Image (cartoon, rainbow, N blue to C red):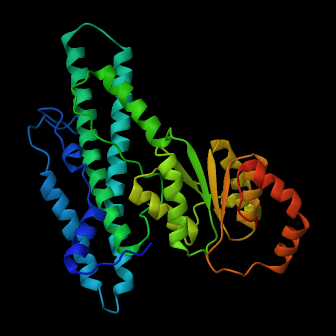
Amino acid sequence: MTTRFSNFSDLAEHYAREIATPDYARAFMEQTELSRLSVADEPSSAEMPDPDAAQAAIEMMLATVFDLFRDTRMEDFASEVAWGVANSFHVVAKRLDDREDAMAKKLQEKLREYDPSEVYATDVEDLTMQARSLAECRDAMECMRDHAASIYLVETGRPFSPVRGSRVSCKSNASMIEARDYLASQRAQRREQFAPSGPVVVFSGGQQFADIGQVHDYLDAVHERIPSMVLATTAQNKGADVIAASWASRQGVPVILCKPDASRGASAPYQRNARMLAFKPVEAIVCSGGGIQANLADRLREARIPLHIVREAGADNEPVQRQAKAAAHGGQQAAKRVANGDDLPPF
Protein backbone atom coordinates (compact mmCIF):
# COMPACT_ATOMS: atom_id res chain seq x y z
CA MET A 1 0.00 0.00 0.00
CA THR A 2 1.23 3.56 -0.78
CA THR A 3 1.77 5.83 2.23
CA ARG A 4 1.23 9.55 1.69
CA PHE A 5 2.91 12.32 3.70
CA SER A 6 1.88 15.95 4.07
CA ASN A 7 5.32 17.20 5.21
CA PHE A 8 8.98 16.18 5.35
CA SER A 9 8.90 15.74 9.13
CA ASP A 10 6.35 12.92 8.87
CA LEU A 11 8.36 11.36 6.05
CA ALA A 12 11.55 11.45 8.15
CA GLU A 13 9.78 9.86 11.12
CA HIS A 14 8.32 7.12 8.89
CA TYR A 15 11.75 6.41 7.36
CA ALA A 16 13.33 6.19 10.83
CA ARG A 17 10.66 3.70 11.93
CA GLU A 18 11.16 1.58 8.81
CA ILE A 19 14.94 1.23 9.27
CA ALA A 20 14.91 1.10 13.08
CA THR A 21 16.92 -1.80 14.48
CA PRO A 22 16.32 -2.14 18.24
CA ASP A 23 18.73 -5.07 18.73
CA TYR A 24 22.03 -3.14 18.71
CA ALA A 25 22.34 -2.93 22.49
CA ARG A 26 21.84 -6.68 22.89
CA ALA A 27 23.90 -7.67 19.85
CA PHE A 28 26.88 -5.60 21.05
CA MET A 29 26.57 -6.73 24.67
CA GLU A 30 29.79 -7.92 26.30
CA GLN A 31 28.99 -11.24 27.93
CA THR A 32 32.39 -11.84 29.49
CA GLU A 33 35.04 -9.57 31.02
CA LEU A 34 37.69 -10.97 28.69
CA SER A 35 37.55 -12.03 25.04
CA ARG A 36 39.76 -14.23 22.92
CA LEU A 37 39.27 -14.86 19.20
CA SER A 38 41.94 -17.51 18.58
CA VAL A 39 44.47 -19.67 20.39
CA ALA A 40 47.22 -17.33 19.21
CA ASP A 41 45.66 -14.30 20.91
CA GLU A 42 46.03 -13.33 24.52
CA PRO A 43 42.78 -12.67 26.42
CA SER A 44 41.76 -9.04 25.88
CA SER A 45 39.68 -6.65 27.97
CA ALA A 46 38.93 -4.46 24.93
CA GLU A 47 35.28 -3.39 24.74
CA MET A 48 32.83 -3.97 21.91
CA PRO A 49 32.11 -0.98 19.63
CA ASP A 50 29.55 1.45 20.98
CA PRO A 51 26.13 0.23 19.74
CA ASP A 52 24.79 3.74 19.07
CA ALA A 53 27.91 4.64 17.08
CA ALA A 54 27.62 1.38 15.11
CA GLN A 55 23.99 2.08 14.25
CA ALA A 56 24.81 5.64 13.16
CA ALA A 57 27.74 4.40 11.04
CA ILE A 58 25.57 1.91 9.12
CA GLU A 59 22.91 4.55 8.46
CA MET A 60 25.54 7.06 7.30
CA MET A 61 27.27 4.48 5.10
CA LEU A 62 24.10 3.46 3.24
CA ALA A 63 22.67 7.00 3.10
CA THR A 64 25.92 8.24 1.53
CA VAL A 65 25.72 5.59 -1.20
CA PHE A 66 22.15 6.44 -2.18
CA ASP A 67 22.62 10.21 -1.85
CA LEU A 68 25.76 10.15 -3.99
CA PHE A 69 24.05 8.49 -6.95
CA ARG A 70 20.54 9.92 -6.57
CA ASP A 71 19.30 11.95 -9.60
CA THR A 72 22.44 11.14 -11.59
CA ARG A 73 23.03 8.85 -14.55
CA MET A 74 24.50 6.33 -12.08
CA GLU A 75 21.40 6.15 -9.89
CA ASP A 76 20.57 2.63 -11.09
CA PHE A 77 23.84 1.35 -9.61
CA ALA A 78 23.21 2.63 -6.09
CA SER A 79 21.25 -0.48 -5.15
CA GLU A 80 24.07 -2.75 -6.34
CA VAL A 81 26.67 -0.90 -4.24
CA ALA A 82 24.32 -0.90 -1.22
CA TRP A 83 23.74 -4.64 -1.67
CA GLY A 84 27.52 -5.10 -1.65
CA VAL A 85 27.79 -3.23 1.65
CA ALA A 86 25.15 -5.43 3.28
CA ASN A 87 26.69 -8.54 1.75
CA SER A 88 30.15 -7.69 3.09
CA PHE A 89 28.78 -7.84 6.65
CA HIS A 90 27.03 -11.10 5.75
CA VAL A 91 30.25 -12.68 4.44
CA VAL A 92 32.23 -11.74 7.55
CA ALA A 93 29.39 -12.94 9.83
CA LYS A 94 29.40 -16.27 7.97
CA ARG A 95 33.15 -16.66 8.47
CA LEU A 96 32.82 -15.92 12.17
CA ASP A 97 29.98 -18.43 12.37
CA ASP A 98 32.15 -21.10 10.74
CA ARG A 99 35.00 -20.36 13.16
CA GLU A 100 32.63 -20.56 16.11
CA ASP A 101 31.33 -23.92 14.89
CA ALA A 102 34.90 -25.23 14.58
CA MET A 103 35.71 -24.01 18.08
CA ALA A 104 32.53 -25.59 19.46
CA LYS A 105 33.58 -28.93 17.94
CA LYS A 106 36.98 -28.69 19.62
CA LEU A 107 35.25 -27.91 22.90
CA GLN A 108 32.96 -30.89 22.48
CA GLU A 109 35.91 -33.19 21.83
CA LYS A 110 37.71 -31.79 24.87
CA LEU A 111 34.70 -32.46 27.09
CA ARG A 112 34.75 -36.11 26.01
CA GLU A 113 38.35 -36.40 27.23
CA TYR A 114 37.61 -35.28 30.76
CA ASP A 115 40.31 -35.39 33.40
CA PRO A 116 40.43 -33.59 36.76
CA SER A 117 43.69 -31.72 36.13
CA GLU A 118 44.06 -27.95 36.28
CA VAL A 119 45.53 -27.90 32.76
CA TYR A 120 42.37 -29.56 31.40
CA ALA A 121 40.16 -27.06 33.20
CA THR A 122 42.20 -24.17 31.76
CA ASP A 123 41.95 -25.59 28.21
CA VAL A 124 38.16 -25.93 28.51
CA GLU A 125 37.89 -22.40 29.86
CA ASP A 126 40.01 -21.01 27.00
CA LEU A 127 38.01 -22.85 24.33
CA THR A 128 34.73 -21.67 25.85
CA MET A 129 36.03 -18.07 25.92
CA GLN A 130 37.06 -18.29 22.26
CA ALA A 131 33.73 -19.74 21.16
CA ARG A 132 31.74 -17.13 23.07
CA SER A 133 33.96 -14.27 21.85
CA LEU A 134 33.43 -15.36 18.24
CA ALA A 135 29.68 -15.61 18.88
CA GLU A 136 29.64 -12.03 20.26
CA CYS A 137 31.41 -10.70 17.17
CA ARG A 138 29.12 -12.70 14.88
CA ASP A 139 26.02 -11.31 16.60
CA ALA A 140 27.32 -7.76 16.10
CA MET A 141 28.10 -8.40 12.43
CA GLU A 142 24.67 -9.93 11.85
CA CYS A 143 23.01 -6.98 13.56
CA MET A 144 24.83 -4.50 11.30
CA ARG A 145 24.04 -6.65 8.25
CA ASP A 146 20.35 -6.76 9.18
CA HIS A 147 20.30 -2.99 9.68
CA ALA A 148 21.96 -2.45 6.29
CA ALA A 149 19.44 -4.90 4.80
CA SER A 150 16.51 -2.97 6.26
CA ILE A 151 17.80 0.28 4.74
CA TYR A 152 18.33 -1.52 1.42
CA LEU A 153 14.72 -2.73 1.58
CA VAL A 154 13.34 0.75 2.28
CA GLU A 155 15.41 2.38 -0.48
CA THR A 156 14.90 -0.27 -3.18
CA GLY A 157 11.68 -2.05 -2.18
CA ARG A 158 13.48 -5.40 -2.44
CA PRO A 159 14.65 -7.57 0.46
CA PHE A 160 18.37 -8.21 0.74
CA SER A 161 19.37 -11.82 0.21
CA PRO A 162 22.92 -13.18 -0.16
CA VAL A 163 24.11 -14.98 -3.28
CA ARG A 164 25.00 -18.11 -1.32
CA GLY A 165 23.76 -19.70 1.86
CA SER A 166 21.07 -18.79 4.34
CA ARG A 167 20.67 -15.51 6.14
CA VAL A 168 19.84 -16.09 9.80
CA SER A 169 20.09 -13.85 12.85
CA CYS A 170 20.30 -14.47 16.54
CA LYS A 171 19.91 -12.51 19.75
CA SER A 172 22.68 -12.55 22.35
CA ASN A 173 22.16 -14.37 25.60
CA ALA A 174 23.54 -12.24 28.44
CA SER A 175 23.83 -15.03 31.00
CA MET A 176 27.11 -16.57 32.07
CA ILE A 177 27.08 -20.23 31.10
CA GLU A 178 29.38 -23.20 31.42
CA ALA A 179 30.94 -25.07 28.50
CA ARG A 180 28.33 -27.86 28.33
CA ASP A 181 25.48 -25.36 28.60
CA TYR A 182 27.08 -23.24 25.87
CA LEU A 183 27.14 -26.20 23.49
CA ALA A 184 23.55 -27.16 24.26
CA SER A 185 22.44 -23.56 23.78
CA GLN A 186 24.31 -23.27 20.50
CA ARG A 187 22.74 -26.44 19.07
CA ALA A 188 19.22 -25.39 20.06
CA GLN A 189 19.75 -21.89 18.65
CA ARG A 190 20.99 -23.20 15.31
CA ARG A 191 18.12 -25.65 15.02
CA GLU A 192 15.63 -22.81 15.41
CA GLN A 193 17.49 -20.54 12.97
CA PHE A 194 17.69 -23.08 10.17
CA ALA A 195 14.40 -24.85 10.97
CA PRO A 196 11.92 -22.20 12.20
CA SER A 197 9.32 -23.87 14.38
CA GLY A 198 6.29 -21.74 13.47
CA PRO A 199 3.39 -22.88 11.28
CA VAL A 200 4.23 -22.61 7.57
CA VAL A 201 2.20 -20.51 5.13
CA VAL A 202 2.96 -21.20 1.46
CA PHE A 203 3.04 -18.29 -1.02
CA SER A 204 3.54 -18.09 -4.77
CA GLY A 205 2.68 -15.70 -7.56
CA GLY A 206 3.54 -14.85 -11.15
CA GLN A 207 6.54 -12.73 -12.09
CA GLN A 208 4.25 -10.15 -13.70
CA PHE A 209 1.99 -9.83 -10.64
CA ALA A 210 2.35 -6.26 -9.31
CA ASP A 211 -0.64 -5.64 -7.03
CA ILE A 212 1.24 -4.81 -3.83
CA GLY A 213 -1.91 -3.83 -1.94
CA GLN A 214 -3.63 -7.18 -2.41
CA VAL A 215 -0.55 -9.18 -1.39
CA HIS A 216 -0.13 -7.07 1.75
CA ASP A 217 -3.82 -7.33 2.63
CA TYR A 218 -3.86 -11.13 2.39
CA LEU A 219 -0.57 -11.55 4.26
CA ASP A 220 -1.65 -9.09 6.96
CA ALA A 221 -4.88 -11.02 7.48
CA VAL A 222 -3.07 -14.36 7.75
CA HIS A 223 -0.39 -12.90 10.04
CA GLU A 224 -3.04 -11.47 12.34
CA ARG A 225 -4.50 -14.95 12.79
CA ILE A 226 -1.10 -16.74 12.84
CA PRO A 227 1.43 -14.36 14.47
CA SER A 228 4.14 -17.06 14.63
CA MET A 229 3.86 -17.93 10.93
CA VAL A 230 6.82 -18.83 8.71
CA LEU A 231 6.44 -17.83 5.03
CA ALA A 232 7.58 -20.31 2.37
CA THR A 233 7.81 -18.75 -1.10
CA THR A 234 8.66 -20.11 -4.54
CA ALA A 235 11.60 -17.65 -4.54
CA GLN A 236 11.15 -15.99 -7.91
CA ASN A 237 13.28 -12.87 -8.32
CA LYS A 238 10.47 -10.53 -9.34
CA GLY A 239 6.72 -10.16 -9.11
CA ALA A 240 4.54 -11.49 -6.29
CA ASP A 241 7.27 -13.48 -4.51
CA VAL A 242 9.43 -10.36 -4.14
CA ILE A 243 6.46 -8.38 -2.80
CA ALA A 244 5.79 -11.13 -0.24
CA ALA A 245 9.45 -11.38 0.79
CA SER A 246 9.59 -7.60 1.27
CA TRP A 247 6.46 -7.75 3.44
CA ALA A 248 7.99 -10.56 5.52
CA SER A 249 11.21 -8.61 6.00
CA ARG A 250 9.28 -5.61 7.32
CA GLN A 251 7.16 -7.77 9.63
CA GLY A 252 10.05 -9.85 10.94
CA VAL A 253 8.51 -13.05 9.56
CA PRO A 254 11.03 -15.83 8.71
CA VAL A 255 11.11 -16.75 5.03
CA ILE A 256 11.95 -20.14 3.51
CA LEU A 257 13.12 -19.63 -0.08
CA CYS A 258 12.08 -22.74 -2.02
CA LYS A 259 14.20 -22.51 -5.15
CA PRO A 260 13.87 -25.16 -7.86
CA ASP A 261 16.78 -27.54 -8.39
CA ALA A 262 18.19 -26.43 -11.77
CA SER A 263 19.70 -29.87 -12.37
CA ARG A 264 16.15 -31.26 -12.74
CA GLY A 265 15.56 -29.41 -15.99
CA ALA A 266 12.17 -28.11 -17.07
CA SER A 267 10.35 -30.14 -14.41
CA ALA A 268 12.29 -28.51 -11.54
CA PRO A 269 9.61 -25.94 -10.57
CA TYR A 270 6.92 -28.63 -10.47
CA GLN A 271 9.06 -30.97 -8.36
CA ARG A 272 9.73 -28.02 -6.04
CA ASN A 273 5.98 -27.49 -5.72
CA ALA A 274 5.59 -31.10 -4.60
CA ARG A 275 8.39 -30.76 -2.04
CA MET A 276 6.75 -27.69 -0.49
CA LEU A 277 3.90 -29.87 0.76
CA ALA A 278 6.45 -31.62 3.01
CA PHE A 279 6.45 -28.44 5.14
CA LYS A 280 2.89 -29.37 6.15
CA PRO A 281 1.59 -25.84 5.52
CA VAL A 282 -1.42 -24.67 7.49
CA GLU A 283 -2.54 -22.20 4.82
CA ALA A 284 -1.55 -20.99 1.36
CA ILE A 285 -1.82 -17.90 -0.84
CA VAL A 286 -1.37 -18.26 -4.60
CA CYS A 287 -1.48 -15.18 -6.83
CA SER A 288 -2.35 -15.44 -10.51
CA GLY A 289 0.52 -16.34 -12.76
CA GLY A 290 1.30 -19.24 -15.05
CA GLY A 291 1.39 -23.01 -15.07
CA ILE A 292 3.70 -23.19 -12.02
CA GLN A 293 1.15 -21.38 -9.87
CA ALA A 294 -1.73 -23.43 -11.29
CA ASN A 295 0.16 -26.65 -10.52
CA LEU A 296 0.89 -25.53 -6.96
CA ALA A 297 -2.74 -24.52 -6.42
CA ASP A 298 -3.93 -27.93 -7.61
CA ARG A 299 -1.49 -29.74 -5.29
CA LEU A 300 -2.61 -27.62 -2.34
CA ARG A 301 -6.28 -28.34 -3.07
CA GLU A 302 -5.57 -32.07 -3.34
CA ALA A 303 -3.83 -31.91 0.05
CA ARG A 304 -6.91 -30.08 1.43
CA ILE A 305 -4.84 -27.12 2.62
CA PRO A 306 -6.86 -23.87 3.07
CA LEU A 307 -6.08 -21.88 -0.05
CA HIS A 308 -6.58 -18.25 -1.12
CA ILE A 309 -6.42 -17.47 -4.84
CA VAL A 310 -5.52 -13.83 -5.50
CA ARG A 311 -6.18 -12.19 -8.86
CA GLU A 312 -4.57 -8.88 -9.75
CA ALA A 313 -7.21 -6.15 -9.60
CA GLY A 314 -8.53 -5.34 -13.07
CA ALA A 315 -6.60 -8.17 -14.71
CA ASP A 316 -8.52 -9.95 -17.46
CA ASN A 317 -5.81 -11.65 -19.45
CA GLU A 318 -6.28 -15.37 -18.88
CA PRO A 319 -5.40 -17.53 -21.87
CA VAL A 320 -8.42 -18.89 -23.70
CA GLN A 321 -7.32 -22.46 -23.02
CA ARG A 322 -7.26 -21.91 -19.27
CA GLN A 323 -10.69 -20.27 -19.31
CA ALA A 324 -12.09 -23.26 -21.22
CA LYS A 325 -10.48 -25.70 -18.78
CA ALA A 326 -11.89 -23.79 -15.81
CA ALA A 327 -15.36 -23.85 -17.34
CA ALA A 328 -15.16 -27.57 -18.15
CA HIS A 329 -14.12 -28.47 -14.61
CA GLY A 330 -16.00 -25.74 -12.82
CA GLY A 331 -18.29 -28.03 -10.85
CA GLN A 332 -15.47 -30.25 -9.59
CA GLN A 333 -13.22 -27.33 -8.66
CA ALA A 334 -16.08 -25.48 -6.96
CA ALA A 335 -16.67 -28.52 -4.75
CA LYS A 336 -12.98 -28.56 -3.84
CA ARG A 337 -13.04 -24.86 -3.02
CA VAL A 338 -16.01 -25.29 -0.71
CA ALA A 339 -14.28 -28.23 0.99
CA ASN A 340 -11.11 -26.18 1.48
CA GLY A 341 -12.78 -22.94 2.50
CA ASP A 342 -11.64 -21.31 -0.77
CA ASP A 343 -14.49 -19.24 -2.19
CA LEU A 344 -12.42 -17.41 -4.79
CA PRO A 345 -12.25 -18.39 -8.48
CA PRO A 346 -9.71 -21.03 -9.53
CA PHE A 347 -7.05 -20.44 -12.16
Q: Residue furthest top?
A: 116
Q: Is residue 81 above or below residue 130?
A: below
Image position of 217 (left or right of 301): left
Q: Is residue 188 above or below residue 335?
A: above
Where residue 324 sits, quadrant-wise, is bottom right
Image position of 209 (left or right of 332): left
Image position of 314 (left or right of 253): right
Residue in the image at 36% along x and 62% along y: 87
**The C terminus is located in which quarter?**
bottom right
Q: In this orientation, which residue lies closer to the viewer: 98 or 292?
A: 292
Please state the horizontal and vertical placement of residue 46, each as a whole percent of the image. Answer: 9, 42
Q: Residue furthest right?
A: 328
Where residue 178 sits, quadrant-wise, is top left
Please state the horizontal and vertical placement of residue 322, each as a whole percent of the image. Answer: 82, 73
**The N terminus is located in which quarter?**
bottom left
Q: Is residue 42 above or below residue 314?
A: above
Q: Is residue 109 above or below residue 327?
A: above
Specify whether residue 255 is in view: no
Residue in the image at 23% along x and 34% along y: 39
Image position of 158 (left or right of 128): right
Specify whether residue 307 is in view: yes
Residue in the image at 76% along x and 60% along y: 295
